[in-house]
Image (cartoon, rainbow, N blue to C red):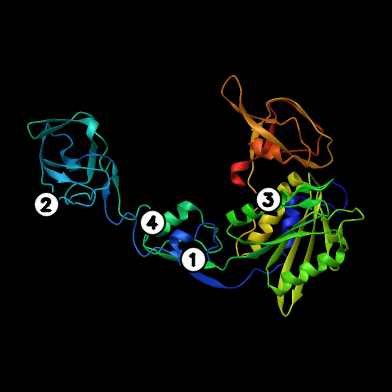
Amino acid sequence: MTEGERSVDEAVAELIATLDPIEGIERVPTTAALARILAEDIASPLDLPAFDNAAMDGYALRSADLGQPALREIGTALAGHAFLGGVEPGCCVRIMTGAPLPPGADTVVMLEDTVREDGQVRVIHVPAAGANVRRRGEHVARGDIVLASQRQLRATDLGLAAAIGRSELPVMRRLRVGLLSTGDELADPPAPLAAGAAYDANRPFLRAALERSGFEAIDLGICPDRVADFEHTLARALADRLDAVVISGGAAQGDADIVRRAGGVRFVALNIRPGRGLAVARLTQSGHATALLGLPGNAVAAFVMFHLVARPVLTHLAGGIATVPASIPVPLAAPVHVRGGRIDYRRASFVRDARGTLTVAPLKDQGSAMLRTVTEADALIAVGPQTDYAAGEPVETIPLGLLE
């Protein structure tokens, strides 16, 4: 690592230390809370399950009767329709998964472990006493914290909230993030391209990534390579009281890189490829702060830097917990040689070897502007700072499904 360069973890920690989370809580329907940041701990007002119930289709009976040659079937218990009587010695009740366990019964024998003839049920494979019963409160006890504040809500969280009777959830207000691309060469479809021009790919995928993260994305368009225009756009973002502005392009060290030349902007260098770093600033107006995060202009570098650094920082700013993407060790399908010196995040595909073992193989093309390679990849692998890796050597792997 070159002096002054940070690891991803160090960069995220440094940036969030300078940014205070936003304030403002709102209540939204549980069904509309996906990806929102939970503002309060959620405690369960009830036990889950709320009653002892069958974990399998079968027969509910007294464990003391498991040694009996046959038991008399006296009724049926269905999910939502309890058997109204009790289970006396020598009797059993046909029961379906989820149905309340009848009084007197403490065990469920699976249907396939029984034989039924003329209203009599024989148990042919004897289970342990208490088998196949979900006990009241074994999943969630009344008063348990089931969802902690600062959690970014997933689909299954919404199901759990509904299971404890929550129709609304308290969440942080949406983080308002402006999205800006810089460069005289950029245009938006369907405008015709002038000589030397290119369509802007970064704003569309960054907007989608922001919205999937639960943030409100405000399109600030394309800014020409003029510092005055850039500063005017930032002034508009401040006037609109945006919480953050994510910029792609203009943050490197070329003569036309306008972001670094704007007042109050500094560059945070990282020991990674692609990307190498990002421009950052904290701008204030009338007591309101707006964070500026400047990403590289090359599409793959912008993708990597957004997901590794910018998104965790924005999550912190939104009131959540800044967490860099999780990785898992996966063996390489073939030897890999890299330049070394930095951590190189390479696009890769998952491959099953002849024994069925999951391995990972870097794609042939690794240019930082080749966005198509991200759409073709399954994962990012982190290689470096060493230069050579043998086939079968585990490398840290981030499945792209965790990012998108």
- First in sequence, mark 4 or 3: give its number: 4
Image coords of residue 339 (percent x, y): 84, 35
As displayed, is residue 398 above or below residue 319? above
Q: Which residue, given by chain and number where applicable, does mark 4 sit on?
A: 140
Image coords of residue 97 (percent x, y): 27, 43
Residue 105 horizontal side relative to residue 403, left or right: left
Element type at marker 3? helix
Element type at marker 4? loop
Confirm whether residue 296 shows in the render: no
Q: Which residue, given by chain and number where applicable, does mark 1 sit on?
A: 41
Q: Nearer the viewer, residue 253 or 333?
A: 253
- Name the kind of residue labelled 1 in the image: Asp
Instruction: Evaluate if marks 1 and 3 touch, with contact meaning CB atoms under 8 Å apart.
Output: no
- First in sequence, mark 1 or 3: give its number: 1
Element type at marker 1? loop
Instruction: Evaluate if marks 2 and 4 touch, with contact meaning CB atoms under 8 Å apart.
Output: no
